[in-house]
Image: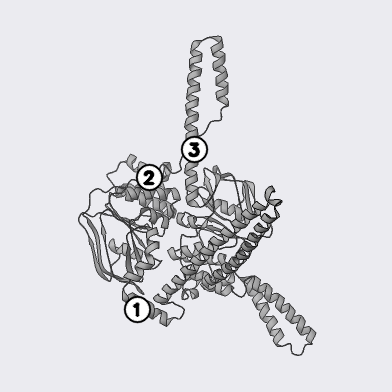
Amino acid sequence: MILACQNISKSFGTDEIVKHVSFHVEDHEKVAIVGINGAGKSTLLKIIMGELSADEGEVTLAKNKSIGYLAQYQDIDSANTIYEEVLASCGKLIEMEARLRKMEDAMANASSQSEGAMEELMDRYNQFSHEFDLQGGFTFRSEITGVLKGLGFTEEDFTKRMHELSGGQKTRVALGKLLVTKPDIIMLDEPTNHLDMESISWLENYLLNYKGAVIIVAHDRYFLDRVVTKVVEISRHTATVYEGNYTAYAKKKEQMRDALLKQYYNQQREIRHQEEVIAKLKSFNREKSIKRAESREKALDKVERIEKPIEENTDIHLTLEPDITSGNDVLTVKDLKKSYERTLFESIGFEIKRGERVALIGNNGTGKTTILKIINELVEPDCGVIHLGSNVHIGYYDQEHQNLHPDKTLFEEISDAYPDLNQTRIRNVLAAFLFTNDDVFKRISDLSGGERGRVSLAKLMLSNANFLILDEPTNHLDITSKEILESALNAYTGTVLYVSHDRYFINRTATRILELTSKQIVNYIGNYDYYLEKREEMQAAYLKPAAAEEEKAAASSNDQKLSWEEMKKKQAAARKIENAIKKVEEEIAEKEALIEALEQECTKPEVAVNSAKLNEIHEKMSAANERLEALYEEWEELSLHQE
């Protein structure tokens, strides 16, 4: 066990945040902490880090173990470049490297020293060089480059100054600094919020192969499914631990809730029965019957009552329904182009039909949000045609929430947008999004990003639009709210076009995916799993030759960039190695199981006295062990190739 939280409780004034929370983390374990917004997840991480003190309980970190923490918001104020900022986190290795260089200089200038002194210097150098190597000294600079590229920075970005970066970029740099220091425990608070899909996929693989323990607070269910092996749920101030990934947790939680609900109803039925019997006995009005009734009453008072399980956030009832039905052709886009300092996309075109739920995906900076703004006439295209079908009424959800007025209260925001609504209806709508009592008189400017998102969704719900255009609708929503939104969109009879990095959300809601890549659109008729399956095949078949030529030109001007064909060959080779590793791992598991079975066989009394049988078993074990050694070597070699 590398970390233990025992009976952690914390309150702020009269607000109880967590109460008697206990869980532990094993070495190499990947743990998720989940719960609705405000459940106390980030508070718990700060208590573990010692940034907040617990009211009671204790956090125990194993001896000589280090812990690294990435908070949800970063504001690194530094004159360093991106590369220098991450490099600075490797101070110990930089010092060791400088010392090594000094030793090398000393050896180069030691011609006048005796042979014995030279030997001693060489021995010290070799020992120190070995220690430097063990700590990753010969690879840490290349690792920094790999981590920064994995997090979505190009080599051109490495020289950008920290004060020039956005908040999201600073968070990515902070994540890079944490990863290269390689603490025994990594704690990440919403690490995927500022990453595109490729960077999230890279981070997943990095954490899966990380030798230390990982604790993650995240609402990205696809990410949690791939990475974690244990889930700690914070609900109603207490913690429940579930083994497995997010899907396993959700299934077990539902099973536990159903079982508890069944117990609750059975107990309620038994309580009602006992109360009826007591009432009947009392009605006889005889000494014996009254004594029996009193005895039953005492027994009933001692029964430990089961509380009815209640789902959190069940107050949100999101209903989206169009006021009128649009024509079958909802949106037609032809020859669309947009450039700023560089070309985002050109000559793209696509159509959307009534009833479709279309996800527009792509890396950060490809122009997805720009396309939505062009459709909403907020940005002018360089050229191209946007045509809306008959009776199309757009409802637009902007991730920047520019449709909200910062000086208005929540109540004014709704009442001004929909003057025909009475006070009761407005309060009911806001209550559906967890704004109750005096919350409705808060100013928009005082709200968090997640709260503004809920207000925007409330306005969208009232719009009765038949074509919803949503830009990152799940950002800042907790998992329960995401699930409610998913259900609402799946039941919606209108048409939806949205941009999202939430792969689980896309998988649950999209009927079609448009990928913006190489300045063009590739169409996939299916959800995110289908996209992953067909991506390579579809890109090779449908990306225009011009894009391929651009790829080749870029590759020839920069030796470090692979051409399209080279990339495909490399991916094919990687898949081949991956399949080979999988086969070797399967055979290793098979041989290990065989050896274990043979060892069990040797312990049987009838076998222990049978020398012929023992010899036969030992021969099989020797052959299996010999093969297992060969498989381990093969696995190591394949793993080296894969790296």
Helix, strand or loop for disc 3: helix
Please name whichever residue, 461 or 409, is drawn nearer the observer in this view of the structure: 461
Amino acid on which the number 1 mark rests in the picture: Glu
- Asked whether, in this view, residue 608 is left or right of residue 573, the answer is right
Q: Quadrant of the C terminus?
A: bottom right
What residue is shown at x 29% (from left), y 43% (from top)?
421
Q: Which mark is residue 549?
A: 1
What residue is shown at x 37% (from left), y 61% (from top)?
531
Q: Are marks 1 and 2 in contact (CB under 8 Å)?
A: no
List x then y, in percent, for residue 424.
34, 39
Q: CA distance from mark 1 to mark 2?
A: 53 Å
Helix, strand or loop for disc 1: helix
Q: Nearer the viewer, mark 1 or mark 2?
A: 1
CA neighbours of label 1 inside 10 A, class few (<14), some (14 to 19), many (20+)? few
* Dot 3 or dot 2, earlier in sequence: 3
284 to 307, vertically: above or below: above
List x then y, in percent, for residue 389.
21, 58
Amino acid on which the number 2 mark rests in the picture: Leu
Amino acid on which the number 3 mark rests in the picture: Ala
Q: Are marks 1 and 3 in contact (CB under 8 Å)?
A: no
